[in-house]
Structure formats: C-alpha cells, structure tokens
C-alpha cells in the first residue's frame, strides 16, 4: 500500500516555500508520494482573489516537475464545491483504495482545525503531518488534544520559509 501525502491549497501563487516543503516532506518522512492538491475553492478563504484554477494547476505542475515523487493534482476540480477536506479524503479513498493517505497541513491550520467541516472524521481516520509556520500558533495552542487524532506528527525539523502567497499577492498589488 503506497503512502500518499495530501498537501492541499490554493497555491495562489505557488512559491519556493511550497516546493521546498514538498521536497523536504518526501525526503524526511515515510511518504512514497506527495500530491499537491490544487483547490478550486477553499471555504475558509475569499474567492475573489483566486487566479483561474487551470493556471494555478499548470504553475504547480511546472514547479514540481523535477521532483519525481511529487505531483500536482486537479482531483478537487471534479468534486462539489466548495472543497471540504473530509469529502476530498473520502473520494480519494474510493478512487485509490490501494493508497493510505496522510494529510499535510501547516500549524496555522491546526490552530483552526476545529473549524473544518467534519474535523473529527479527518482526525480519527487519517494521519496528519503538521509543518511549522513562521508567526503562527504553536502546536501546543491547538484547541484539540493530540489524543483526538489517529496520528498527529509534528514535522518540527521542517524548514521555515519566510514567504507566503498572501505576501506575494500584496507585493504585486493584488490582495
């Protein structure tokens, strides 16, 4: 059974932090593959600032083309919108029963994990890898307890990247 990490996001735009983290995760965890799942519509973010989904997918594909175990995925493009992670994980399990999926999220998302739709389902059925984010709450500040998760792995040695898609858009005059 292949172990596949799911690293979802808007990737609006994709940047060296996304790519650097993807490469680090493949090199330093037990995952066989990492799929960068480009979401067409994150329910926790405003939609007006998103570049077209096909452009974002093409940019992610280009950014990871030289990392063999990492691929860009349009899986969520074919699901009902908005994209809820619990639904995506269910559909991934149906489509790829031969894979074991692990969710890869930033600690900023862990801090608000209890706001995700069906977070209990995700936490009790999937491993969750958490990477550090500069300036975000630490894992200890999470409102959920470690025992609420099937397996929660904090990637404490993952590099911190001092960049975000938001800061790139701001520097370009786009919000």
Image: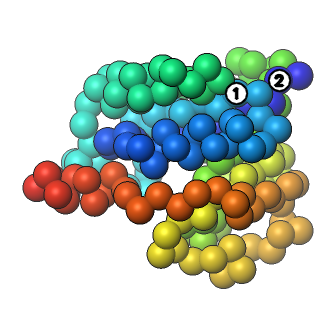
Find the distance from the CA under tag 2 to the CA under tag 1.
8 Å
Residue positioned 63% across, 43% down in the render: 24
x and y percentages locating residue 145 in the rendered image = 80, 74
Q: Quadrant of residue 173?
A: bottom left
**Position of the C terminus by quadrant:** bottom left
Within-10-Å neighbours for mark 1: few <14, some 14–19, many 20+? some
The residue under label 1 is 33
x and y percentages locating residue 6 in the rendered image = 64, 37
x and y percentages locating residue 129 in the rendered image = 72, 52
- SS class of the residue under badge 2? strand
Say if 111 sits above or below 91 in the image.
Answer: below
Q: Camera-side residue: 100 or 153?
A: 153
Q: Camera-side residue: 5 or 125?
A: 5
Which label is found at residue 5?
none
**Position of the N terminus by quadrant:** top right
The residue under label 2 is 2
Q: Work out whether residue 6 can be spotted.
A: yes
């Amino acid at each position: 059974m292949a172990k596949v990490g799911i690293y979802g996001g808007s990737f609006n735009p994709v940047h060296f932090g996304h790519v650097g983290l993807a490469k680090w995760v493949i090199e330093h965890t037990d995952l066989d593959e990492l799929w960068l799942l480009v979401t067409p519509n994150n329910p926790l973010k405003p939609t007006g600032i998103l570049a077209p989904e096909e452009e974002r997918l093409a940019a992610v594909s280009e950014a990871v083309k030289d990392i063999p175990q990492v691929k860009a995925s349009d899986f969520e493009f074919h699901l009902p919108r908005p994209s809820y992670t619990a639904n995506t994980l269910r559909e991934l399990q149906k489509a790829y029963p031969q894979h074991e999926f692990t969710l890869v999220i930033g600690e900023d998302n862990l801090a608000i994990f209890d706001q995700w739709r069906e977070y209990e389902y995700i936490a009790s059925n999937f491993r969750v890898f958490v990477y550090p984010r500069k300036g975000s709450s630490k894992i200890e500040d999470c409102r959920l307890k470690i025992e609420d998760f099937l397996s929660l792995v904090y990637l404490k040695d993952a590099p911190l990247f001092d960049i975000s898609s938001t800061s790139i858009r701001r520097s370009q005059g786009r919000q």
